[in-house]
Amino acid sequence: MNNSSNNSHFIGFLVVLLVALTLLLASGNVMAGSVKWEALSNTEQSVLKAFQGEWESLPEKTQGSLRRWAAKPAAERVRIKQRFNDWSKLSEPQQKNLTKQLKRYRAMSVEQKVRIKQWHGWVKKLPETERKKLREEWKNMSDVERKAYMKVLQEKYGGR
């Protein structure tokens, strides 16, 4: 994958991961307070059935986070779980690198973020063969080679 594609996937991945971690770890006032398993709605019980045996021993903060998780639409829960599983499979250096990239992205100006999104949109419109070539070759190119390569692609497929 090319750096821009990696950055796009990385940013989306980290946003989802942060949401999942926040749901699981953050305290919230919306559903604060220890709740007995029987007091949960049928939907909450269904979604959280893996926690039934330990539910009442979980801290209030964790219960609240899990209840917010259960309130998410099913598709979003699946997406977040998948992103978390993907994150878990990464090595520690990869996780640290992605975390560093997210911090760098968050520190960017709105204009820089817009340019990055435009860049990713432009790359996504390239033919699959060009995207594949870009992913394979980008990481081994110098900055000068990258600029020259991008100039060729822009001439061939139009500017971004």
Image: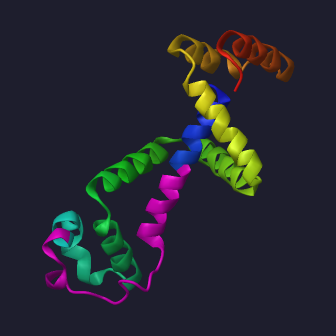
- Whether residue 80 is situated above or below residue 122 in the rendered picture: below
Question: Horizontally, is 47 left or right of 137 in the view?
Answer: left
18 over 84 or under it: above or below: below
Nearer to us in this view, 128 or 155 = 155
Residue 40: % across, % down: 19, 80
User: Which residue in the rendered view is the most extreme toward the right?
Assistant: 144
Tell me: 155 left or right of 50: right
Is 6 left, or right, of 34 in this rendering?
Answer: right
Q: Residue at x 38, y 87 (%)?
A: 32
Question: Does residue 1 appear in this view?
Answer: no
Measured as percent of width and height from the top left, residue 18 is found at 52, 59
Instruction: Give the answer, above or below, for where 33 lies relative to 10.
Output: below
For the point 81% across and 20% down, which residue is it? 147
Q: Considering the image in quadrants, where does the N terminus appear?
A: top right
Which region of the structure is painted magenta? 14-43
Q: Does 30 lie within the magenta span?
A: yes
Is 16 magenta? The answer is: yes
Question: Residue 57: which quarter of the image?
Answer: bottom left
What colouring does the structure picture have? rainbow
Pick out the residue farthest to the front.
158
Query: How many labels, in total?
Result: 0
**Place of residue 99 in the rendered image (x, y in percent of width and height, measured from the top left):** 64, 51
Q: Residue at x 66, y 30 (%)?
A: 3
Q: Is residue 41 visible?
A: yes
Q: Which residue is painted at 34% across and 90% down in the image? A: 33
The location of residue 28, given as percent across then percent down, is: 44, 81
The C terminus lies in which quarter of the figure? top right
